[in-house]
Image (cartoon, rainbow, N blue to C red):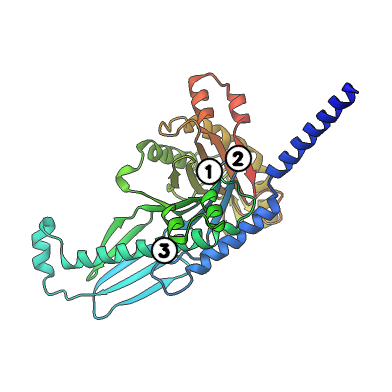
Amino acid sequence: MKMTRKIAIGILVIACSITTSFGQSIDEERMERDLKVAENILSTLASDNNRVRLFDNVESNFIPDYGVIFSIPSPSHIYSVGEARSVVRSSRSVGVNTYVISESSEDDEEEEVSGKAKKTEKQKKLDEVNKESSEKMKEQMVLFLADYADLIGQLQPSHRIVIQSRGRNDKLYIFNGRRISQSQSALSAQILKSDLMAYKQGKMNRDQLIDKISFTTNEEGSVSKDLELFSTIFSRLYESDLSNTYYMSGRSLGYTKLDGLGVTFNMRVYSSSSNDGLHVINATGETGLSREERDEKVEAMYPEFEKTFKENLLDYGRTIRSLKSDEMLIFKVKLTECIGCDMPEEIEVTVKGKTLQDYDKGSLSRDKAVEQVSVKKK
């Protein structure tokens, strides 16, 4: 009888364990659907005549044990001073907002002579436009997080919902035909799923919920030198003269950093060039290839690209000293076009800071470290 009771208890424990396991598992198809709907909402919220637009290329990513991150492009701004009236024009395809600010130019020469001694009227107006554009983006983020983020199912109370602007685009000022560039900082906003749950349960009002949304700005002066150095190193590795597979078209690697998560780099790679319908594989120098021949060779390169990418991430990622052991180095890589090929269109490569640190100290072998680099294919 005792044995029967023990068996019954054992079965109950196993059943509870299975139930818990299933309760914590993620239905990836449902999550993907929820994220696509949320992406559309973010784009729709910004699809009016506001000065800040998010466009259609909103990206999302679910990270287990962290939450969901929405990545939106930082709009490129062009401010033109000296026109007769104020208008706003934006190009939806390239993400450029143009501001024409009405202002007399009679005292331009006097202001230029005074230099930085005093802030000109033009600069004051530009500061106002900058502030308005930042506040408009904040409003859009708040509206989404407060009213729509709860549509993403399966998130745990500890999960975060984050919206971050992508890249570090410049603002371009045109003073009566004179072009001046000024960098702009990235903005991010986040809220905990537990706060959304408390709001839905009536435990806090909407104003209290909004107060729970935290904003951070990556100011230019706070950029980590080790991240800039790593970006330069990795960009050089994937220039066409060094890469033996796919390559980048330029030396620019955009990235964003979030405390508690780590740093995310965005990268796009290519494999060939074409002329009069014939293709050249840059890595091998093969020329005169048809589209079919080109695609076959490009597909065959993918396994080597993935292998060397993981190795490069380990060898050079350990130079990032500002990455904490519980944070991650993430690469979102859009791959070269390959029609009908059995290879992903995009991969997300992730390695933990602890793995990089242990590998750097020699307490983790290269083979073991490579095993700890995960690749998610899309």
Whether residue 225 is visible? yes
Q: Amino acid at mark 3?
A: Glu
**Distance between the Cα atoms at labels 3 and 2?**
41 Å
Residue 64 placement: quadrant: top right
* The one of 96 and 47 positioned closer to us in this rendering: 47
> Of circles 3 and 2, which is in front?
3
Left/right placement of residue 351 relative to residue 29 reads left
**Distance between the Cα atoms at labels 1 and 2?**
14 Å
Task: Name the residue beneath numbered marker 3.
Answer: 139
Q: Amino acid at mark 2?
A: Phe
Q: Residue furthest front?
A: 1
Task: Name the residue beneath numbered marker 2.
Answer: 305
Point out residue 151 in the picture as x, y percentages from the top left corner. 60, 59
Q: Residues within 10 Å of mark 2 (few under 14, many from 20)?
A: some
**Distance between the Cα atoms at labels 1 and 3?**
29 Å
Q: Amino acid at mark 1?
A: Phe
Left/right placement of residue 146 relative to residue 290 reads left
Task: Name the residue beneath numbered marker 1.
Answer: 331
Q: Is residue 229 above or below residue 68?
A: above
Circles 1 and 3 in contact, beta carbons < 8 Å: no
Give the secondary structure at mark 2. helix
Earlier in the chain: of badge 3 and badge 2, it is 3
Q: Residue furthest right?
A: 1
